[in-house]
Image (tube, helix red, strand yellow):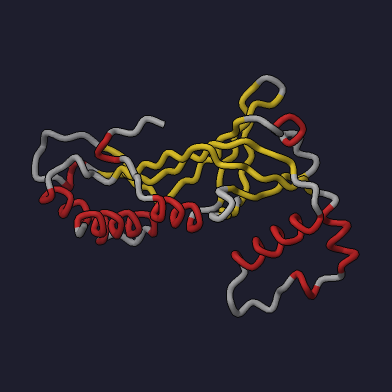
Amino acid sequence: MYIPKHFKLDDEETICDFIESYSFATLFSQHNGEPYATHLPLLLNKSENALYGHFARPNEQWKDAENQQVLAVFQGPHCYISPSWYETAKAVPTWNYVAIHVYGKLEIVEDPNVIADSLHEMVSKYEQPDSPYSLNDVDPHYIEGMTKGIVAFKINITKMDAKAKLNQNHPVERQELIIKNLENTSKPDNLQVAALMRKNLQK
């Protein structure tokens, strides 16, 4: 990923927080000699420096992804930045965003205990705290049958590139104008980008 020095994210804790907050990723590998992508949630295991997930078994990406150097892309909030918000007419539109690229070797997971732990962790992460749903309450035979329809995997992380393009290369006064205009909208991504820009200015 092309990352100008203004936009590079180096703080590992911040990067991990983004991965956990925006965990629905796009996973790329080579399949049948062509780039291939699957959209799926991935769970970060910090202690193992790894990502866990699973393919639907009919998705043949898993058949040749093992041992490949794969790429998982995590897309954070993003939004259009209008030059009309600047204090000058000498400007062009741009786009602010946060993106994390995670590279690693993919291995297929066959241990049923590891698969079960991963599935339980995923459900726990995405269900609301007051949700009555729990995998522990589902018929084990049903879960066993459904598990046969997936292929679990682990990505052993080898490299992470992180980019936060938040107008850091512009004067502070202009950044504040952008933040003000973003905060005057009701779009969630605009508000999230504004919050990130404000946090960055306060460093």
Task: Check the image and name the residue furthest to the top.
Answer: 33
Task: Check the image and name the residue furthest to the right.
Answer: 141
Left or right: residue 2 compared with residue 34: left
Q: Position of residue 194 (x, y in %)?
A: 28, 56
Quarter of the rendering occupied by the N terminus: top left
Name which residue lies at 27% across and 46% down. 166
Q: Is residue 84 above or below residue 143?
A: above
Left or right: residue 61 compared with residue 29: right
Name which residue lies at 59% across and 48% down. 50
Quarter of the rendering occupied by the C terminus: bottom left
- Give the number of marks: 0
When asked about the image quadrant of residue 112, the answer is bottom right
Q: Position of residue 72 (x, y in %)?
A: 55, 40
Left or right: residue 84 compared with residue 72: left
Q: Position of residue 70 (x, y in %)?
A: 59, 33
Q: Is residue 148 above or below residue 127?
A: above
Name which residue lies at 32% across and 40% down. 8
Name which residue lies at 70% across and 64% down. 120
Left or right: residue 14 compared with residue 39: left
Q: Position of residue 129 (x, y in %)?
A: 58, 76
When asked about the image quadrant of residue 199, the answer is bottom left
